[in-house]
Image (spheres, rainbow, N blue to C red):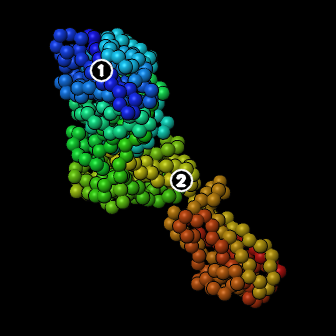
């Protein structure tokens, strides 16, 4: 179709201006029959380097617009169906407005959209604008075309959207004001459910040209699923100079089939609403042992426990060599092996156990639930304690306070950490003299009955011995009272 840009020129104290009217070239002069979905007309140029955007939807729009004289470009985009759907037609008019009345013909067709003035070639497919795909993310760092932000940890807060073509008055492009004409907008576009982050649409709009200020757009993102609500549950992403020139917290990329718009939309989570999982339990254990219980809890953003409204599945996994598994009880028998646990309705937590067949110092347990942030816990899976290794002075003098270290070890003499207090009986079993055992290096804090225990999460313990009488060889024997198969002996001389 053809449009006419007709100008009537006048002069005032600020210079020469043109009063421009836009109309259809047919006898009706109405724009609506040719563009039932609405038409947007942009302008850029003039001696003041200005721009504007006027919108006609059902022929509602300004009757005219006053422009400064000089060279102007008039890009035009119209839709033949409501809500930015259907066939898109484009046109470009150029004029040098001066102190004469004139008309500028603008031809609008779908073929004209296949031009760099409306979109780079990478945003076109089959000569048409690629439809929009909206992706909601907590962060848009590192995103790529055709990618997504799927998963509870990555997906943003958007639940629905509206796409709006913006109108604004004649202004300096660096200070484009809020729209002054009603926006041409899409229907409510419902977002994907669960942890899926992208929403494909049939909406086609011009992308723009780098360095220009045409084709202003807005993506309005709602946290609701039906485009309801208000700030702070609604976020506007304003592409005031076109999608190609970007917006704060948004990134536009050319995908294979769609124009991808990644939106960083992550509102502050609300207290009292399930937001994340928490995982607690032992950070140390030996391979072959049934470790646990580990507790998975549902919490809100401020770590308050939240009871679930219905049975909710927790998926379990772990890193490292896959020679272990999860279990529902403390026996860790094959009959109780699991990969999931259920947080039952009305409760906030569940428990499980873990067993592994080899040592690994950096196992990471992961608990995940759909729509919530996953929880992890690191576990040092050591060897099985089976013996004691004792180090300390082989000689000493009468009355000296001598320090000895007992290390809990596996069969290969590698140190292993105690997963529960391990009792050690210390006995002076033979020798010419007698002495006492102490906890401190000054030999002032007596060790009752010669007993000492390994603290949890420690692999060694230190004690002190002082010979109080006699001299000659004395053998100190350290015997484990937890059933380990080995013990060790060290002999001191010359007291």
SS for callout 2: strand
Q: Would you name the residue on which mark 2 appears?
A: 381
Instruction: Identify whether 305 is placed above or below 52.
Output: below
Badge 2 or badge 1: first in the primary sequence: 1
Q: Is residue 414 visible?
A: yes
Q: CA distance from mark 2 to mark 1?
A: 85 Å
Q: Nearer the viewer, mark 2 or mark 1?
A: 1
At horizontal 43% and vertical 44% (from top left) the residue drawn is 317
Q: From the viewer's perspective, is 435 left or right of 244?
A: right
At horizontal 40% and vertical 41% (from top left) the residue drawn is 264
Q: From the viewer's perspective, is 417 left or right of 51?
A: right
Q: Residue furthest right?
A: 494
Task: Compare residues 264 and 104 and report the one nearer the observer.
Answer: 104
Image quarter in which the C terminus is found: bottom right
Circles 2, 1 touching at the beta carbon (< 8 Å): no
Instruction: Identify whether 243 is placed above or below 310.
Output: above
SS for callout 1: strand
The image quadrant of residue 452 is bottom right
Task: Compare residues 7 and 214 and report the one nearer the observer.
Answer: 7
Q: Position of residue 438 (x, y in %)?
A: 65, 82
Q: Position of residue 162 (x, y in %)?
A: 27, 34
Image quarter in which the N terminus is found: top left
Q: Which mark is residue 8?
A: 1
Task: Compare residues 228 and 191 and report the one nearer the observer.
Answer: 228
Q: Position of residue 206 (x, y in %)?
A: 36, 23
The image quadrant of residue 45 is top left
């Amino acid at each position: 179709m053809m449009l006419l840009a007709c100008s009537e020129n006048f002069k005032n104290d600020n210079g020469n201006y043109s009063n421009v009217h836009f109309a259809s070239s047919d006898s009706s002069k109405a724009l609506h029959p040719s563009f039932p979905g609405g038409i947007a007309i942009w302008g850029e140029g003039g001696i003041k380097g200005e721009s504007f955007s006027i919108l006609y939807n059902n022929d509602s729009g300004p009757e005219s617009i006053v422009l400064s004289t000089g060279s102007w470009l008039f890009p035009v985009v119209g839709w033949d169906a409501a809500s930015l759907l259907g066939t898109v037609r484009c046109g470009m008019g150029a004029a040098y407005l001066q102190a004469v009345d004139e008309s500028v013909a603008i031809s609008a067709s779908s073929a004209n959209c296949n031009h760099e003035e409306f979109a780079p070639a990478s945003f076109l497919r089959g000569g048409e604008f690629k439809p929009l795909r909206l992706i909601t993310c907590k962060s848009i760092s590192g995103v790529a075309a055709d990618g997504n932000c799927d998963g509870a940890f990555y997906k943003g807060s958007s639940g629905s959207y509206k796409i709006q073509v913006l109108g604004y008055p004649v202004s300096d492009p660096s200070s484009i004001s809020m729209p002054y004409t009603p926006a041409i907008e899409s229907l409510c576009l419902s977002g994907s459910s669960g942890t899926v982050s992208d929403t494909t649409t049939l909406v086609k709009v011009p992308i723009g040209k780098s360095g220009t200020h045409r084709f202003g757009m807005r993506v309005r993102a709602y946290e609701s699923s039906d485009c309801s609500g208000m700030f702070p549950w609604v976020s506007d992403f304003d592409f005031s100079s076109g999608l190609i020139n970007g917006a704060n917290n948004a990134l536009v990329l050319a995908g294979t089939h769609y124009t991808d718009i990644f939106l960083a939309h992550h509102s502050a989570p609300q207290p009292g609403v399930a937001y994340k999982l928490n995982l607690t339990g032992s950070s140390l254990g030996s391979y072959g042992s049934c470790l646990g219980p580990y507790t998975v809890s549902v919490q809100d953003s401020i770590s308050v426990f939240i009871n679930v409204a219905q049975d909710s599945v927790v998926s379990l996994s772990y890193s490292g060599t896959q020679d272990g598994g999860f279990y529902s009880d403390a026996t860790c028998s094959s009959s109780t092996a699991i990969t999931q646990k259920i947080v039952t309705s009305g409760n906030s937590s569940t428990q499980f156990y873990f067993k592994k067949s080899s040592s690994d110092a950096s196992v990471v347990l992961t608990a995940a639930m759909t729509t919530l942030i996953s929880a992890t816990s690191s576990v040092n899976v050591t060897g099985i304690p089976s013996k004691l290794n004792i180090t300390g002075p082989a000689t000493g003098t009468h009355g000296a306070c001598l320090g000895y270290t007992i290390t809990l070890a596996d069969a290969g003499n590698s140190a292993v950490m105690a997963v529960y207090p391990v009792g050690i009986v210390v006995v002076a079993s033979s020798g010419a003299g007698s002495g006492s055992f102490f906890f401190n290096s000054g030999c002032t804090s007596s060790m009752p009955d010669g007993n000492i225990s390994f603290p949890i999460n420690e692999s060694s313990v230190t004690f002190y011995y002082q010979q109080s009488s006699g001299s000659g060889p004395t053998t100190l024997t350290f015997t484990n009272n937890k059933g380990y198969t080995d013990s060790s002996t060290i002999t001191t001389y010359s007291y």
